[in-house]
Image (cartoon, rainbow, N blue to C red):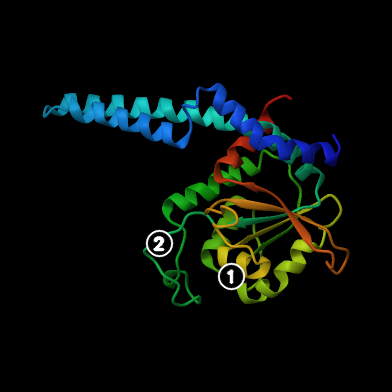
């Protein structure tokens, strides 16, 4: 499959998503999901019991119904993504891309006061560490070649890189900000991809995009760039697609399934 055909598939994915959701009776739109969850919760509160055993049984039923909604709509979401994901995975396996990954989820109660110690920085939350490790488990199944893995010196980016991809080359944030546009524009070594684990403000400063106004970029997400420049990176780059946190698992599922 050539790159023009793949590009057409990516362009059509939005239409595909709309068709899949429509075929599901539109029950997985944001509004419908909120209504369905509300109905389940209201039913639980209306039939609540002061008896402990009955209350626990009610919670188990509530959890089961919510899991069913999640599973149903997650499958709708996956089916809308599968063609784009298959094309993306094929491209990444050929190499030639720069993958900019935002660190995993952090503890927002913490602040960066001194980079000399992890104890005085905003670090990954426990869920963030689990998320990064999960990305690592999925990444190991994708067979995507990486030539260079880069992280800033912050503990949250370094730990995200270590858990998800391996031991990174550390480039200080201030230095990476000056070099990022060039890194996005220079093609990696033949057959390889570059992975950079960084921050939102770093990407905004280097590229001029505004998050989330221009594009969503949550913790654990990645943006895939295609370098267009020569050895000096003087011809720029283009944003190809976003890999959401859930898309990591989609790509692993695609990799495991026969076409």
Q: Are marks 1 and 2 in contact (CB under 8 Å)?
A: no
Q: Looking at the rendering, which quadrant does residue 173 occupy?
A: bottom right
Q: Residue at x 47, y 69 (%)?
A: 118
Name the mark nearer the viewer: 1 or 2: 2
Q: Residues within 10 Å of mark 2 (few under 14, many from 20)?
A: few
> Which circle's residue, 1 or 2, is located before the other in the chain?
2
Q: Could you classify mark 1 by the number of other residues whose Cα lies within 10 Å: few (under 14), some (14-19), or many (20 or more)? A: some
Return the x and y of residue 86 as percentages of the image width and height.
Answer: 72, 34
Image quarter where the N terminus lies is top right
| Residue 237 left/right relative to 154 | right
Residue located at (41% from left, 60% from top): 107
Question: Where is mark 2, residue-wise?
Answer: 108
Q: Which mark is residue 153?
A: 1
Q: Which of 217 and 125 lies nearest the eye of the viewer?
A: 217
Q: Secondary structure at mark 1?
A: loop
Q: Residue at x 74, y 44 (%)?
A: 144
Give above or below for 211 relative to 154.
above
> Looking at this rendering, what residue extends furthest in the left direction?
50
Image: 249 above or below 46: below
* x then y, percent, for residue 230: 88, 63
Q: Is 92 in front, or is 242? A: 242
Residue 223 location (% of width, % of height): 65, 53
How much space separates mark 1 and mark 2, taking CA atoms? 19 Å
Query: On the rendered structure, is 184 left or right of 55?
Result: right
Q: Position of residue 22 (x, y in %)?
A: 55, 25
């Amino acid at each position: 499959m050539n790159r023009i055909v793949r590009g057409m598939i990516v362009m059509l994915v939005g239409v595909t998503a709309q068709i899949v959701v429509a075929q599901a009776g539109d029950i997985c739109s944001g509004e419908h999901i909120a209504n369905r969850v509300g109905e389940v919760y209201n039913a639980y509160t209306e039939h609540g019991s002061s008896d402990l055993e009955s209350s626990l049984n009610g919670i188990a039923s509530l959890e089961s119904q919510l899991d069913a909604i999640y599973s149903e709509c997650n499958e709708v979401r996956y089916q809308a993504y599968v063609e784009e994901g298959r094309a993306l995975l094929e491209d990444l396996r050929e190499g030639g891309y720069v993958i900019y990954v935002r660190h995993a989820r952090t503890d927002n109660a913490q602040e960066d006061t001194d980079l000399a110690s992890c104890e005085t920085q905003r670090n990954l939350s426990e869920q963030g560490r689990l998320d990064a490790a999960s990305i690592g488990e999925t990444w190991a199944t994708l067979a995507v070649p990486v030539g260079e893995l880069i992280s800033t010196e912050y503990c949250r980016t370094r730990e995200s890189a270590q858990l998800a991809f391996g031991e990174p080359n550390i480039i200080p944030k201030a230095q990476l900000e000056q070099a990022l546009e060039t890194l996005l524009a220079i093609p990696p070594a033949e057959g390889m991809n570059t992975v950079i684990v960084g921050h939102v403000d770093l990407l905004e400063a280097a590229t001029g995009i505004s998050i989330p106004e221009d594009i969503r970029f949550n913790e654990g997400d990645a943006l895939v760039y295609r370098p267009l420049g020569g050895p000096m990176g003087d011809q720029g780059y283009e944003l190809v697609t976003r890999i959401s946190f859930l898309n990591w698992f989609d790509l692993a599922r695609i990799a495991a399934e026969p076409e």
